[in-house]
Image (cartoon, rainbow, N blue to C red):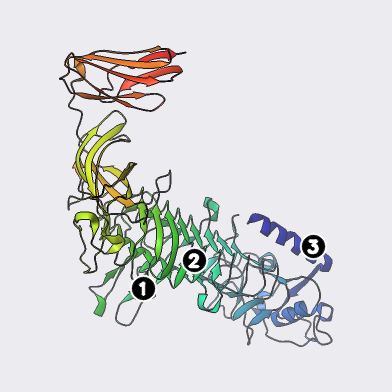
Amino acid sequence: MRWIWATLAITALIGRAASAQVITVTTSADVVDFQGAQQVGDLPGPDGKVSLAEAGLASDNTPGVQTIGFAVPQGEWEYQWLFPGRVVLRPFLGFRVFDTAVLDATTQTEFTGDTYSDGGEVVIWAETYLIDNIGGEMRGFDNTSINLSGGTGNIIQSNSASNITVYDSSFNLIGGTHPGEGNTGGTIKIDRASHNVVVGNTFSRVRILGWLGGGQPAVGNRVGGSSPDERNYITGYGTFNGEGCPGGTTVQIFDSLDTIIEGNWIGTTPDGMRQGNNASVVGVGFEGENHGAMILNNRIAGILARGYDHCRNYVAGYAIALYGAGGDFVIQGNSIGLNALGEPVLGSVTGIASFDYYLGPVRDILIGGPGPGEGNEIAGHLASGIEIVNPLAGIRISGNSLHHNSSLGIDLVPASFERGVTPNDPMDGDSGGNGLQNFPVLSEAVRRESSVRVIGAFNSRSERSYTLEFFAGAECDATGYGEGDRFLGAVQVVTDVAGDALFDAVVPGDVVVGEFLTATATDNASGETSEFSACIEIAGSAIDCGAIRKFTAKCRDGTLTAKVVSSLPEGTELTLARNGGDPKTVTINARGKGKAKWNGQSGAQALRIEECPEVPEASTTCP
């Protein structure tokens, strides 16, 4: 996208060089007294001054791109009781510029000095519109309602305490990545507008609104980005009604395509340590019909509202609310419920919550992922970490860290609305959130040097492929199920005609004896993930490693052979790990010996016994 801004900037500079005209506003009076064609050359009028309205008319009537600057003497500053230290311009019918212009309020600061240290020195106390501007700019204003309508490629920067609306306008830049370029204020609203970039700002809320029914979706808008200097601080939006009931969505996404919300801090004060608004009920909320949204690497916390008066027993808060139709969302790498120090103290009621929608539930959602940085950390919530209600389905939950939530890590809710653990049923014939997908049943977990051996059983629909994911943590949930603090790895299983699959898997990951292991199951065809399984305590190996007398490796004719000589009991199983992968299981025979072979090996070979890391490696070189 950066090449777009560079191209627009070059185009704008060419136009400005051709005109090279600056119009300077020198009065706060709302007058128009200049005559003729009302172009730049006709200024000023008989009063010898230039008003904001005159500057706008002259800019529109003069070819080229003009810069409207400000040098209003302090003797004309009005409304100082309301806006001290600022020039207040109050055009009776609002202010509109129909031809591309640059509105630069920083010139007023250069003229009179920094008279208002908290923001810009010019207030336009009326609706201000850049209409059909292409490559226009507006910067340095305070407490101004800024509206882009039509046009493309405009830049809105360095404005304070303002509201910004982009309507039916594309490829605009709101904010910037350099110091001082960001805007501050109440709401940024992207309304039936596409391919806009919002970066480096501090606002209470952001709304992305399309109109799919009218053929005007909001397409390809990006809020934030992958680098810290693109981060927006969206501190929270909510209000209390007359009954004391809270309500408000901090980032609202309605009727959109391919929206990206990335790298922002949402719901907290800019330092990430406190709740930003005590009436905000939703952090990131989907409404209407949305497709292809990506919620990536944000900090979403402090979304928790408590009512008062007639609503004094009402508590609500959802860091991410999945509502409406559509789907194909990716929610990855987010910190949900944690402050800037990583402490789980700013949780909501539910971290990620789903809701049924009368036009059809949202589908095909990926929450997390098995790759580095793809999992979300979801912690500190008053109820569950993730809640999927009936009839939502196709929600894949993978690789996340869920901990310190008061209820379940993952709660699949049946049609009868009961929260809590949903027991498995034979061949998974029940229905509810995510089809009430069955979870694995763990029977044994044994620590090895850098892995854990997991044995268990799984039952679900017949002759289908499933991914089983395993998690470790220092604590088990009070229910005995989950939560899933640390993702270890996954294995694939296929059920037989009766829906059964046994597994005996070695999963990589450093674990501690006495920690707890839990697991989920995901139907690879439908993408539906289960709740967490019951926890099982991780045990240490029961093998007497001191009984191993010899462990050797040698090569002959391209075959690598490993031998174990021991006084271990007959039938003892050992896993031999090779530096090139492909582990082998060795069973000790009645003579206390075991052997394993690998064909077609070459180069240096190092083998170890996973159950006995204290036994020295056996090494050799195969030609």
Q: Which residue is mark 2?
A: 203
Disc 1 is placed on an element classified as: loop
- Foreground: 245 or 158? 245
> Foreground mark, 3 or 1?
1
- Asked whether, in this view, residue 536 is left or right of residue 323, the answer is left
- What is the three-letter code of the residue carrying label 2? Phe
- The image position of residue 407, as x and y in percent, is 23, 57
- What is the three-letter code of the residue carrying label 1? Tyr
State the separation of the CA atoms marked 3 and 1: 51 Å
Quadrant showing the N terminus: bottom right
**Label 1 packing within 10 angstroms: few (<14), some (14-19), many (20+):** some
371 lies above or below 349: above
First reached walking from the N terminus: tag 3 or tag 1: 3
- What is the three-letter code of the residue carrying label 3? Ile
Residue 99 appears in the figure:
yes
Q: Which residue is mark 1?
A: 357
- The image position of residue 569, as x and y in percent, is 15, 20
591 lies above or below 154: above
Residue 440 appears in the figure:
no
- The image position of residue 456, as x and y in percent, is 21, 41
Q: Which residue is mark 3?
A: 14
